[in-house]
């Protein structure tokens, strides 16, 4: 019932939010008589704030139209390369009329960027994509909102996530011979499982894996996120955060962990920060600080856009990764699309290089959680520089913003390039 109650309240509030938006514009427009009234700026700011608090946030767009490569402006065509019931493999195709630039584009390596399925949309990695496009052919997993997936498409399990990743890797191998994989946060675990299973079967594995800020071993330096997962039973999660999608969505009847509950959890981790941010937004509107206003809107347009996760996938992730630690304990079995049960054995990976990245101040995936991948992948020779702790970076700083662009990305780029050269030398 909670989902239905939320939808009812949202439907009631949304018209008032739109009215507040219209009122804000009238009080702000210098040609409107209302803008000459006493306290017009404060009224406009209050209405704008109410609109932001009450509006519905749709899935954002990547909006990457061009990047600069070797001093040339290169156009980007975003397209869906493969589509599955719960995910789209999205490609950012690069175009140039400059012959020299075109030759450079053809020789650059292909990268599969595996985005998290943990509340926010893949557009959270917009900065990751934009930087990577300078030196790579980039593909990304764009996970669908479970409330938009009809029940006729079946359920979505953690095993399906692992199988999707393998299919995407094989697709890129067919196109380019091989590829590199970057996983950010939650997908580090299923990506490691996917590559491990491919290695155990004797399949070709990616040239390199870069794992960033993920819970490979969630027992190390546990955070508040880890604490919640271990302090509550599996049945508590099923009984308290799982609801059915209301009738007004294509996925009506599907059991999900709703996005609005996830968002409430995100905000609850740092409530003071969000309150102060909205108060600053109100003051910036009054002062006419358009730069700060635009920055606030850009951040919260992304932050407030959340998706529902299929219940089976979410509950299995909690149990597998954060409660039973199946990957670390060597007891994780995955069901393949043809029904075969296979044990995940990271020690079977041989021809894939591994790099891990962590933020010094990460409060979501604690120190050492991602680095633990090296202890599991004993078949991969450990090299100096294969682990990078980013000074002063929190969770989001390792894949977005200035630290990502200036510190992390050059490190990742050089690792991929070196791995490609090493693979070519062995061929």
Image (spheres, rainbow, N blue to C red):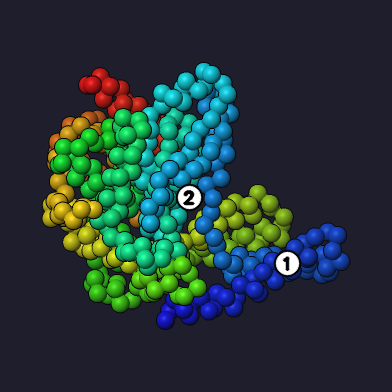
* Residue at 73% in and 67% down: 22
Residue 280, above or below 398? below
Q: Are marks 1 and 2 in contact (CB under 8 Å)?
A: no
Point out residue 388 in the picture as x, y percentages from the top left corner: 31, 38
Could you say which quadrant of the image residue 281 lies in? Answer: bottom right
Please name the residue that numbered disc 1 is placed on.
Answer: 22
Viewer-closest of 339 and 58: 339
Q: Is residue 22 left or right of residue 38?
A: left
Viewer-closest of 342 and 414: 342
Viewer-closest of 181 and 160: 160
Could you say which quadrant of the image residue 410 lies in? Answer: top left
Please name the residue that numbered disc 2 is placed on.
Answer: 123
Task: Using the rendered image of the protein, determine whether residue 344 is visible from the camera's viewpoint.
Answer: yes
Please tell me the numbered disc located at residue 383.
Answer: none
Viewer-closest of 251 and 110: 251
Q: Quadrant of the N terminus?
A: bottom left
Q: Is residue 98 left or right of residue 328?
A: right
Circle 2 packing at 10 Å, graded few (<14), some (14-19), many (20+), is some
Circle 1 packing at 10 Å, graded few (<14), some (14-19), many (20+), is some
Q: Is residue 170 left or right of residue 59?
A: left
* Residue at 43% in and 72% down: 252
Point out residue 169 in the picture as x, y percentages from the top left corner: 31, 40
Q: Quadrant of the C terminus?
A: top left
Tally of numbered discs: 2
* Residue at 33% in and 76% down: 240
């Amino acid at each position: 019932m909670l989902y239905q109650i939320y939808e009812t309240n949202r439907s009631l509030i949304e018209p008032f939010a739109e009215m507040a938006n219209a009122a804000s514009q009238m009080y702000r427009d210098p040609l409107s008589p209302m803008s000459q009234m006493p306290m017009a700026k404060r009224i406009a700011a209050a209405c704008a704030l109410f609109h932001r608090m009450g509006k519905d946030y749709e899935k954002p767009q990547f909006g990457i139209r061009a990047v600069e490569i070797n001093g040339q402006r290169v156009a980007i065509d975003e397209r869906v390369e493969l589509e599955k019931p719960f995910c789209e493999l999205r490609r950012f195709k690069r175009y140039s009329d400059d012959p020299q630039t075109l030759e450079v584009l053809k020789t650059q390596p292909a990268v599969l960027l595996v985005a998290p399925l943990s509340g926010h949309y893949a557009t959270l990695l917009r900065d990751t994509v934009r930087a990577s496009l300078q030196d790579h052919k980039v593909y990304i997993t764009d996970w669908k909102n479970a409330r938009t997936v009809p029940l006729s498409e079946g359920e979505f399990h953690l095993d399906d996530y692992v199988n999707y990743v393998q299919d995407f890797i094989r697709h890129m191998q067919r196109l380019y011979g091989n590829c590199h994989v970057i996983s950010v946060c939650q997908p580090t675990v299923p990506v490691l499982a996917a590559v491990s299973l491919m290695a155990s079967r004797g399949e070709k594995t990616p040239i390199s894996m870069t794992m960033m800020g993920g819970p490979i071993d969630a027992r190390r330096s546990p955070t508040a996120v880890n604490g919640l997962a271990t302090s509550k039973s599996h049945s508590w999660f099923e009984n308290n955060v799982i609801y059915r999608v209301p009738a007004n969505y294509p996925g009506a009847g599907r059991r999900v962990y709703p996005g609005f509950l996830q968002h409430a959890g995100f905000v609850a981790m740092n409530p003071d920060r969000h309150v102060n941010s909205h108060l600053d937004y109100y003051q910036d509107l009054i002062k006419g600080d358009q730069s700060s206003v635009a920055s606030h809107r850009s951040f919260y347009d992304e932050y407030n856009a959340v998706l529902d996760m299929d219940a089976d996938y979410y509950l299995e992730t909690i149990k597998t990764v954060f409660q039973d630690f199946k990957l670390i304990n060597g007891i994780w079995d995955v069901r393949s699309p043809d029904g075969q049960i296979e044990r995940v054995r990271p020690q079977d990976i041989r021809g894939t290089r591994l790099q891990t990245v962590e933020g010094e101040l990460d409060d979501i995936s604690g120190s050492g959680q991602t680095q633990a991948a090296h202890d599991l992948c004993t078949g991969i020779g450990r090299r100096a520089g294969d682990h990078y702790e980013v000074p002063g970076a929190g969770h989001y700083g390792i894949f977005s913003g200035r630290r990502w662009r200036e510190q992390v990305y050059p490190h990742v780029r050089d690792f991929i390039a070196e791995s490609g050269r090493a693979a070519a030398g062995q061929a």
